Amino acid sequence: MNEDQSGLTDRAAAAIRTRFGDAFPKTVIVLGSGWGRFAERLSNAASMSYADIPGFSRSTVAGHSGNLVVGNIVGLPLAVMQGRIHGYEGHLPQALAGPIRTLRKLGAERLILTNASGGLKRELPAGTLVIITDHINFCGFNPLVGPNDESIGPRFPDMSEAYDPELCGRLADAAREAGVPVKTGVYLFTLGPNFETPAEVRMFAALGADVVGMSTVPECLVARHCGMKVAALSLVTNLAAGLSTTPLTHQETLATATNSYEQVEALLLKFLRKKQF
Ligand code: HPA
């Protein structure tokens, strides 16, 4: 990170402290396409538009409102990123690093990422919830490219446990307790914005991936680099191209997310209620 980026995260952290006070939650959840409603479950909540935080850009995508919300949920202080930016919107890879590093600077220790994805296997149809246990960065897009600031993290960060096994286990326990069926799987990251071709989908499945999507991996890389624990939950909103009988649309993604919302919420509430945090 060069001086400018460091200065930017300092200014962002100062703006957030001015709005929410000095005690920032240790747990942050990023809400992906169609998951934004979860922020309404926070009590004593205060919200800040990304437009008012240096280095936080508003997404141009429907379903991503662009607010940082801080409050309490089932007794736990929680910060919620309602919406995220994506590489396919034209943001430089490094621009995705700023918000996560800012939250780390404020004291956040764990990052829960949520997203929508396409199922690469018939056993993962629309409506399936998947705990992401590992990922494949298929597009080469990487927010850690550039000079490295050793005070933030190492030049060559280890990704053996990109998704924290204990948090994954807790997600599985929470799903069982909430009576919500879940699978586990590998998430493959494409830059997008187009959905995949059927040939790409066959290749991704052959490479060992279970679901495909256009987010999450950059945030995971930045968070692991700066020492945060990461967990990620994906909602399959469609079978991927070639497996699906209909053309894919973002409307379908949002509609499936809306239909599955109750289950998603039940699982997240159980997960966050687990007091060990
Ligand atoms: N491919 C990539 N990203 C997605 C998909 C898909 O099929 N569905 C939702 N996000």
Image (cartoon, rainbow, N blue to C red):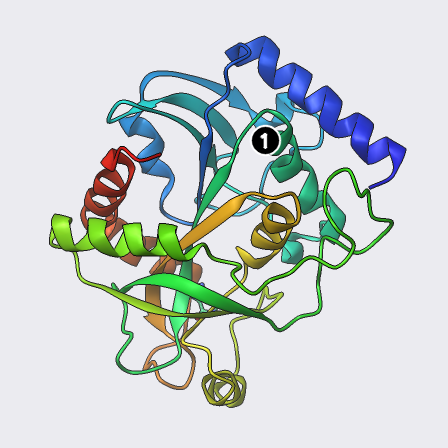
Residue ID for mark 1: 103
Q: Is mark 1 within 8 Å of ligand 1?
A: no
- When asked about the image quadrant of residue 240, the answer is bottom left
Left or right: 52 with respect to 184?
Answer: right
Name the residue rendered at 56%, 27% in the picture.
107
**Where ligand 1 lies, by quadrant?**
bottom left
Where does the image place residue 138, in percent across and percent down from the top left?
A: 62, 73
Q: Is residue 123 above or below residue 191?
A: below
Give how far across and how far down residue 211 sits, in percent: 42, 72
Eyeballing the image, is 111 above or below 251? above
Q: Is residue 57 visible?
A: no
Nearer the observer, 6 or 255: 6
Which of 180/75 is in front? 75
242 left or right, relative to 173: right
* Image point (51%, 36%), residue name: 109
Q: Is residue 173 visible?
A: yes
Quarter of the image with the N terminus is top right
Residue 46 in the image: above or below residue 227: above
- Quadrant showing the C terminus: top left
53 is higher (above) or lower (below) than 56: above
